Image (cartoon, rainbow, N blue to C red):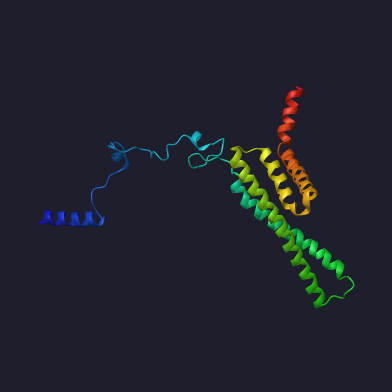
């Protein structure tokens, strides 16, 4: 009876964790861990794999690491529209203050200045946005036609944009617009390649 009580008590104690045989760390140290690794494989990583010298991206098959003209077209058009709106708003504020300088500060003067700001902002945003749209469209068409992306596409797109934008002014207007577009895009291409040209000149001098 006594042994049965002890076994019953030990069973209940083992069930609720209040009693039972205890094992020290020394006893468990010699027990082999069959099929288990002492260190998780996810923690056993060579630190050299965590240091990357270049950026790595997951790209679709055949895609380039740099954005093409079609991807940059949205940024170009939006940026030109916002730039034109900001410049037009400042220009409208200047013109509004100049035209109403003889008027006292009142509601009619504020309304006139506000109308000038909104009118000039919309005008310049429309102008620069249209130019950016034409430039981006010509750039994408030239890139797809030639199958290459270089500064020649930039200059050609700028020239064609100026010619089409000024086509309403006749032959002289077309020529003037083409020359203006070619000069602006040529300066932009020169600015982008300035460091490369400087390095080439330095290497040749050595």
Which residue reaches farthest right?
Answer: 102
* Residue found at the very far top of the displayed protein: 206
Q: Which residue is drawn at 69% across and 58% down?
A: 82
Q: Is residue 3 left or right of residue 129?
A: left
Instruction: Please identify the quadrant where the N terminus is shown.
Output: bottom left
Residue lying farthest to the front in this orientation? 170
Q: Nearer the viewer, residue 109 or 39?
A: 109
**Residue 117 lies in what quarter of the image?**
bottom right
Which quadrant of the rendered structure holds the C terminus? top right
Residue under the image location 67 percent in, 51 percent down: 134
Residue 10 rendering spot, x and y as whole percentages: 19, 54
Q: Residue at x 72, y 30 (%)?
A: 199
Find residue 53 and report its horizontal and vertical position in percent. 56, 35
Between 144 and 14, the one lying in front of the other is 144
Q: Residue furthest bottom?
A: 107
Q: Determine whether, in the image, residue 48 is placed left or right of residue 75.
A: left
Residue at 30% in and 43% down: 24
Q: Quadrant of residue 27?
A: top left
Residue 21 appears at what percent x and percent y? 23, 48
């Amino acid at each position: 009876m006594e042994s049965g009580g002890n076994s019953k008590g030990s069973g209940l104690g083992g069930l609720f964790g209040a009693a039972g045989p205890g094992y020290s760390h020394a006893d468990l140290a010699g027990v082999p861990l069959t099929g288990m690794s002492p260190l998780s494989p996810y923690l056993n990583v060579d630190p050299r794999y965590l240091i990357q010298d270049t950026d790595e991206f997951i790209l679709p098959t055949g895609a380039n690491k740099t954005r093409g003209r079609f991807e940059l077209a949205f940024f170009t058009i939006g940026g030109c529209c916002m730039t034109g709106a900001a410049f037009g708003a400042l220009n409208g504020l200047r013109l509004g203050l100049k035209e109403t300088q003889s008027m006292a500060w009142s509601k009619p003067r504020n309304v006139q200045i506000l109308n000038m700001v909104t009118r000039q902002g919309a005008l310049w945003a429309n102008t620069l946005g249209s130019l950016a749209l034409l430039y981006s469209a010509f750039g994408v068409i030239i890139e797809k036609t030639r199958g290459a992306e270089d500064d020649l596409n930039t200059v050609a797109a700028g020239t064609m944009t100026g010619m089409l934008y000024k086509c309403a002014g006749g032959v002289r207007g077309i020529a003037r617009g083409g020359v203006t577009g070619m000069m602006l895009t040529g300066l932009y291409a020169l600015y982008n390649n300035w460091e490369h040209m400087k390095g080439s000149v330095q290497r040749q001098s050595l």
